[in-house]
Image (cartoon, helix red, strand yellow):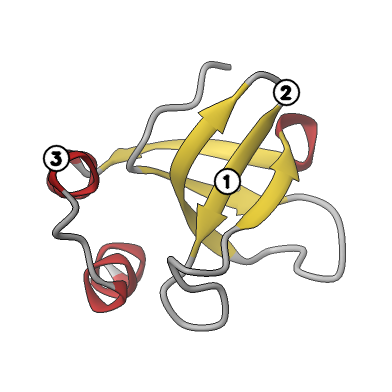
């Protein structure tokens, strides 16, 4: 599965198993994710793509705000809670 910026994913492995994240960056076999609470934008979590499960929920707002640099942690929390 190809992961997109702003996509909601859920961790399948590790001590954070079951945690929902938003994809902030995707590079090769890794995605960099944040949840806005424990993993904030200044401390991204690096996960192998085989350790995350993608969903069809994609926030175009988050993707656009990442491009122009106006994203904040509370926006990611709001997206993940919906």
**Which residue is disc 1 drawn over?**
32
Element type at marker 2? loop
Instruction: Spot the residue most to the right.
Output: 14
The label on residue 29 is 2
The residue under the point 20% across, 39% down is: 67
Determine whether, in the image, residue 26 is placed left or right of residue 61: right
Mark 1: give few (<14), some (14-19) or many (20+) Cα within 10 Å. many
Q: Position of residue 33 (x, y in %)?
A: 54, 53
Q: Is residue 57 above or below residue 29?
A: below
Q: Is residue 6 left or right of residue 62?
A: right
Residue, disc 3: 64
**Distance between the alpha carbons at the discs numbered 1 and 3:** 17 Å
> Which residue is at the front of the view, 60 or 42?
42
What crowding class fits label 3: few (fewer than 14 Cα within 10 Å), some (14-19), or many (20 or more)?
A: some
Which residue is nearer to you in this view: 28 or 77? 28
Estimate the x, y position of residue 77 in percent, counting from the top left. Answer: 33, 74
Q: Is label 1 in a helix, a strand or a loop?
A: strand
Q: Residue at x 29, y 39 (%)?
A: 58
Circle 2 Cα neighbour tier, 10 Å, few/some/many (<14 / 14–19 / ≥20): few
Quarter of the N terminus within the rendering:
top right
- Compared to 61, does 71 lie above or below? below
Question: Does dot 3 land on a helix, a strand or a loop?
Answer: helix
Q: Earlier in the sequence, mark 1 or mark 3?
A: 1
> What's the distance in space between the residues labelled 3 and 2, CA to CA?
23 Å
The x, y position of residue 29, in whole percent, is 72, 23
């Amino acid at each position: 599965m190809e992961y997109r910026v702003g996509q909601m994913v859920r961790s399948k492995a590790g001590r954070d198993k079951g945690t929902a994240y938003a994809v902030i960056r995707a590079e090769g076999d890794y995605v960099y994710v944040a949840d806005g609470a424990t993993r904030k934008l200044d401390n991204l979590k690096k996960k192998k793509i085989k350790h995350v499960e993608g969903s069809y929920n994609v926030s175009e707002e988050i993707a656009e705000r990442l491009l122009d640099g106006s994203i904040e942690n509370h926006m990611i929390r709001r997206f993940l809670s919906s």
